[in-house]
Image: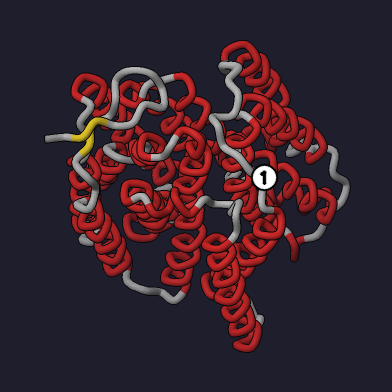
């Protein structure tokens, strides 16, 4: 929720604390810090046990949220949002990883489905919640609302999460590698923001960011390959299932969640409908996701089979994008909502499944790293996709061409999904390897 809840509160925040020129960093500092922290927490959970790390992250998130609501300057708020993002990255990754400690892979989808729906629903409704809170009790409650939610989550987590130790992983967190990784991600986010939003930094600044991104990424990859305790274990990325799952996470981020922020604007422009109606259109996406997530989870729980679902999901989503490429003024809002719902159905077929696939393929001591790798792929996809879509709309590009480009991304995802090995989810104890299919 905190990724998007400040969207409608920003004008009030600027009126109160100033700093209009830096208000974009209220978003960027949070998402950047969250993206940087994900693999660190994934690895730390593998080494130290996920329960204690998860509880610390939850507590840190609550405390930093309260502090954000006490900010008196924009600089103060941006810094606190970064701290909030560092804790939020751990909550996002470990909330999925702890499920792997408690539930067998075959039945895990039924538990992961609510996690995915909460993520999707909160992302969509958060701006509305932020607007209501800002107009009634003030913008500071956009952050303070996390206090009762967070305390409740802490109490539930303390009681419910198994007291398991680390799953046999050895070594320590690669701090220098984490620093290099942070530089690479920061340079990439700054580069995509410059390109996507037309910031007047000039060509030299863009070129410098590109060089920094390439060099830092190269150094990080080299360190992963050669270091005894890499931040992302090389063995994790060598597994074909985890690699495909990460690519599918990136696909979802680029083609679906990056589009969510722009879809109401596109519909308002083409159909000339009120903002409320265009925003409600996203409910069709959530309903479609809900239907397919719970339906496919029940199917997997009965059979353990999952290989065809990402192929089907990507193909259905690509078809919905092709249909939406024909959007024009003759369409009704109901017609548009129907195809947005189909997009949700396709996405729900594999949105949370990719995490379960990666967890099942990884050895027990690397489940956290596998989870964080897939989540990282999705978040990077959102960042890159949002910048690309924003750039396309800013240059008055044809919306039909945009939808067709996203359909191409999803079609590529379907092709990549064909590389998944023939496996079935195990139905016994958590962490058991998947069964080979005949």
Q: Which residue corresponds to the image point at 61% horizontal and 18% vertical from the top-left?
A: 157
Between 225 and 306, the one lying in front of the other is 225
Please state the horizontal and vertical placement of residue 218, each as a whole percent of the image: 55, 72
Q: Is residue 302 above or below residue 60?
A: above
Instruction: Tell me which corner region of the image, top left, top right, bottom left or bottom right, holds residue 120.
Output: top left
Quadrant (top left, top right, bottom left, bottom right) of the N terminus: top right
Q: Which residue corresponds to the image point at 51% horizontal and 35% vertical from the top-left?
A: 365
Instruction: Tell me which corner region of the image, top left, top right, bottom left or bottom right, holds residue 307.
Output: top left
Please state the horizontal and vertical placement of residue 319, each as a whole percent of the image: 18, 53
In this picture, residue 150 sits left or right of residue 291: right
Between 197 and 151, the one lying in front of the other is 151
Quadrant (top left, top right, bottom left, bottom right) of the C terminus: top left
Q: Is residue 59 above or below residue 262?
A: above
Name the residue carrying label 1.
Answer: 172
Residue positioned most to the right: 72
Badge 1: few (under 14), some or many (20 or more) residues near its Cα, within 10 Å?
some
Residue positioned most to the bottom: 204
Q: Which residue corresponds to the image point at 43% horizontal and 47% vertical from the top-left?
A: 274
């Amino acid at each position: 929720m905190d990724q998007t809840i400040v969207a409608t509160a920003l004008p009030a925040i600027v009126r109160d604390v100033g700093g209009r020129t830096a208000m974009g960093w209220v978003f960027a500092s949070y998402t950047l810090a969250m993206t940087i922290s994900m693999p660190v927490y994934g690895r730390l959970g593998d080494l130290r046990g996920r329960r204690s790390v998860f509880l610390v992250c939850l507590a840190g998130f609550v405390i930093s949220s309260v502090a954000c609501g006490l900010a008196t300057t924009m600089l103060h708020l941006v810094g606190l949002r970064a701290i909030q993002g560092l804790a939020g990255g751990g909550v996002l990754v470990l909330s999925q990883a702890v499920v792997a400690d408690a539930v067998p892979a075959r039945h895990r989808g039924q538990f992961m489905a609510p996690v995915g729906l909460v993520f999707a629903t909160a992302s969509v409704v958060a701006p509305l919640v932020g607007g209501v809170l800002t107009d009634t009790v003030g913008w500071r409650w956009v952050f303070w609302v996390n206090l009762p939610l967070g305390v409740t989550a802490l109490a539930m987590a303390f009681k419910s999460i198994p007291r398991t130790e680390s799953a046999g992983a050895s070594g320590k967190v690669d701090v220098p590698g984490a620093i290099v990784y942070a530089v690479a991600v920061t340079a990439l986010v700054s580069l995509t923001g410059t390109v996507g939003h037309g910031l007047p930094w000039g060509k030299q600044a863009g070129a410098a960011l590109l060089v920094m991104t390439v060099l830092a990424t190269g150094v990080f990859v080299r360190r992963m390959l050669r270091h005894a305790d890499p931040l992302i274990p090389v063995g994790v990325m060598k597994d074909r299932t985890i690699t495909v799952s990460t690519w599918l996470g990136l696909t979802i981020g680029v083609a679906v969640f990056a589009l969510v922020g722009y879809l109401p604007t596109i519909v308002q422009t083409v159909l000339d409908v009120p903002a409320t109606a265009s925003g409600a259109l996203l409910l069709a996406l959530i309903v479609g996701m809900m239907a397919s997530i719970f339906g496919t989870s029940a199917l997997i729980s009965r059979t353990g089979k999952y290989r065809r679902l990402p192929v089907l999901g990507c193909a259905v989503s690509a078809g919905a994008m092709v249909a939406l490429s024909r959007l024009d003024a003759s369409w009704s809002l109901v017609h548009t909502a129907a195809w947005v719902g189909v997009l949700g159905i396709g996405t729900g077929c594999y949105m949370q499944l990719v995490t379960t696939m990666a967890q099942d393929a990884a050895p027990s001591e690397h489940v956290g790293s596998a989870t964080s790798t897939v989540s990282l792929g999705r978040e990077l996809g959102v960042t890159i996709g949002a910048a690309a879509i924003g750039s396309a709309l800013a240059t008055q590009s044809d919306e039909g061409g945009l939808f067709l480009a996203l359909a191409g991304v999803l079609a590529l995802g379907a092709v990549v999904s064909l590389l998944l090995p023939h496996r079935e989810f195990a139905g016994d104890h958590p962490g058991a390897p998947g069964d080979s299919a005949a």
